[in-house]
Image: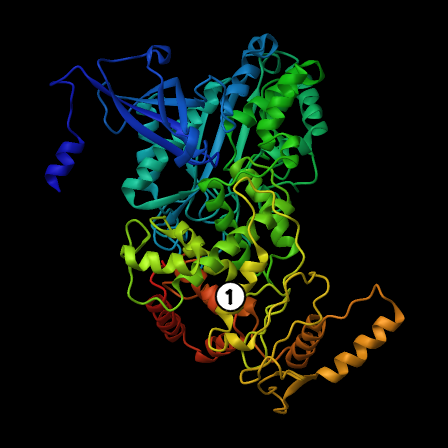
Amino acid sequence: MALLTDLINLNLFDSTKKVIAEYIWIGGSGMDLRSKARTLSGPVNDPSKLPKWNYDGSSTGQAPGEDSEVILYPQAIFKDPFRRGNNILVMCDAYTPAGEPIPTNKRYNAAKIFSHPDVAAEETWYGIEQEYTLLQKDVKWPIGWPKGGYPGPQGPYYCGIGADKAFGRDVVDAHYKACLYAGINISGINGEVMPGQWEFQVGPSVGISAGDELWVARYILERITEIAGVVVSFDPKPIEGDWNGAGAHTNYSTKSMRKEGGYEIIKKAIEKLGHRHKEHIAAYGEGNERRLTGKHETANINTFKWGVANRGASIRVGRDTEKEGKGYFEDRRPASNMDPYIVTSMIAETTILGKHGNKQLRWKIQMDANGTSQNLNKSSARWDEFAKLKFVELCEEEISKGNRPRTYLSKDGWDNLVRRFKIMTGRSYNKKQMRNHWDSIKFEWCLFKDLMRGQTEIGWDEARKTIVADDKWWEERVQVNDKFRRFRNRDLSLICRYDVLFSDVVDTGARARTPDGQFHVGGPKKEAAYDEVEGSGNNDECLKLIVAEQTRENPENYVLPAAGQSRENQENIIFPVAGQSRENHENCVFRGQSRENGENYMLPSSSFAKRKSSIRSETRKSRFSLRDDIENLANMISAKISGTGPSIKDCLALLGKIDGVAVGSPTYFYACNFLCNEDNREMFVAIGDDTARYNWIMYNYNISKSNNPWLP
């Protein structure tokens, strides 16, 4: 380790004139930072003298695989506090090979705003207060907090000192000094109101340099936390409840505001910001609605107000500014994960250019804020690997919140998914496009499950996330279904996560559990046609695979709709219980007993026939569906036993208290899926001891993993 440390700290200045330049850029999410290093022949102080470079945009979610090259344009140089000497950090923005800024390049339009003669003449100053939270690496819980528990209430932690109040000061101090060394105009640090949360301030910085400096300060912070073994979070509300969120308050002034009589200019600027409140809120960070609640030193997200020394306002004016009649104001709305290029340029554009600004430029900056143009909704959705990953991550989060009551997300789940996906990826896909992708990957999941069913003599390459099998095995499986070939040599790390989305659900509009826990699968819903670039899925094939999966022991006893049968007219779909022949299905029985009286539930076909005849006699437009009776019966059973068993919400509350099951971890999502089963929930609650619950969850997880080696 001593040698490694010596090599890391090796000074190249005495042995070579060459220097290392670390090129930094913003990735596809708009919040992830990427970097790579190259060797230069000698020191460089002017970014225009640096060579352009390129990277694989398909691996960052910023370009398709068939045309993946993205070009880096160096824009700002800082001293490298990690390598030191003449080595440098280079902040870049990204362009296509043709020289067009890529969609996630927010700096390009911001630079145009700041180069406008009216804006440049005002010498805009910014001071950005970047709040962030330090998390424990393994459990993603704030440092200084007991695992799965909470510290004492807020109050003693703001600017606090002492081992029981200040957590992570070594990281904060190291970051402070590293930024000063790099040449960033960092003006201070302090502990925040929530324990484990800190703040640093960058500025005053002029124009576009405010964005450059904040992004590089974030980069340095990420590097230091990497060394320290902790995780930095810019989530605007990392912990729900009576805890402060994290913002990026932006202090702002112009030359006119700093002169005598500037207070009147300030008030006019604030009035302009109020007129465009919704536009700014849309650009001020993902998840900001969780933070701007009107509590914890924030204004409500739907209300614009300003005041002197009022930290519960959208805009705060300082006492000194009011007293002196000139100065600056503070926009308290931006979230900690905001893009400083967008926020700083929007404030300048609104307050200086206003209605007299370049309309085309204003439209472009609004596009940056919204992540896309309005016409994108009319085009096909592009699902590259980055978009697929974010879709799955966001779906997992919604499911963990209980927003998948049946086979699809709830209305709140879809709304959250559309909104958060837009902010995280810059792509404005509507609910229909999201549902189409859900159906498409559900088909993939069903196909993959069918490929693996009953297969035991295969291996799993953990590093490559691929199936290990010989050519003969693949040839045999492809003969069964030619579509299986798509999984050969394919990275399956993402498809393995689909279990969380689709396990224990079937395409009937309900969870389709009978009292004995068996599945009885209905016909597929009528869904909109796919419009994905990659091609549509096939719901009927997916349904067949689901039926085979859920009824693998007696698949011969299940009948799918006949060929040509419409989706609306499925009264002839039969669900006989095990042992009944296809020809003898007078009675469709839900086997098992009710909890209260042990009665068997039966749907006699004669009653169906009578009802069907009656309905047809009343109107030809009405349709009878066995699925309706099944759903009605399921609702009746649910009502009959409601209140007697633990809810998913109850179990998730208990799950969150168990050490070793970190929220968002594979184990956590497995447990969420496992506890969708009512019997499992009852057992989970009945165990009574957190350690025993954890062991029981892991026992079942290991059983599942032994049968499904692709599980994480």
Q: Is residue 424 left or right of residue 144?
A: right
How many numbered discs, if any?
1
Quarter of the image that includes the C terminus: bottom left
Q: How is the image coloured?
A: rainbow
Q: Residue furthest right?
A: 618
Residue 617 placement: quadrant: bottom right
Quarter of the image that includes the N terminus: top left
The foreground one among 215 and 443 is 443
Q: Secondary structure at mark 1?
A: helix
Q: Is residue 438 visible?
A: yes
Residue 277 placement: quadrant: top right
Question: Does 450 sit above or below residue 615?
Answer: above
Residue at image mark 1: 653
Q: Is residue 429 left or right of residue 146?
A: right
Say which residue appears at 70% left-offset and 23% top-offset. Answer: 272
- Residue 369, position in %: x, y? 59, 30
Q: Is residue 380 left or right of residue 38?
A: right
The foreground one among 77 and 670 is 670
Under mark 1, the amino acid is: Ala
The foreground one among 443 and 153 is 443
Q: Is residue 357 left or right of residue 581?
A: right
- Residue 452, position in %: x, y? 39, 63
- Residue 197, position in %: x, y? 44, 44
Q: Is residue 308 visible?
A: no
- Residue 513, position in %: x, y? 58, 74
Question: Does 295 sit above or below residue 624?
Answer: above
Badge 1 local density, few (<14 within 10 Å), some, or many (20+)? few
Question: Does 316 sit above or below residue 542?
Answer: above
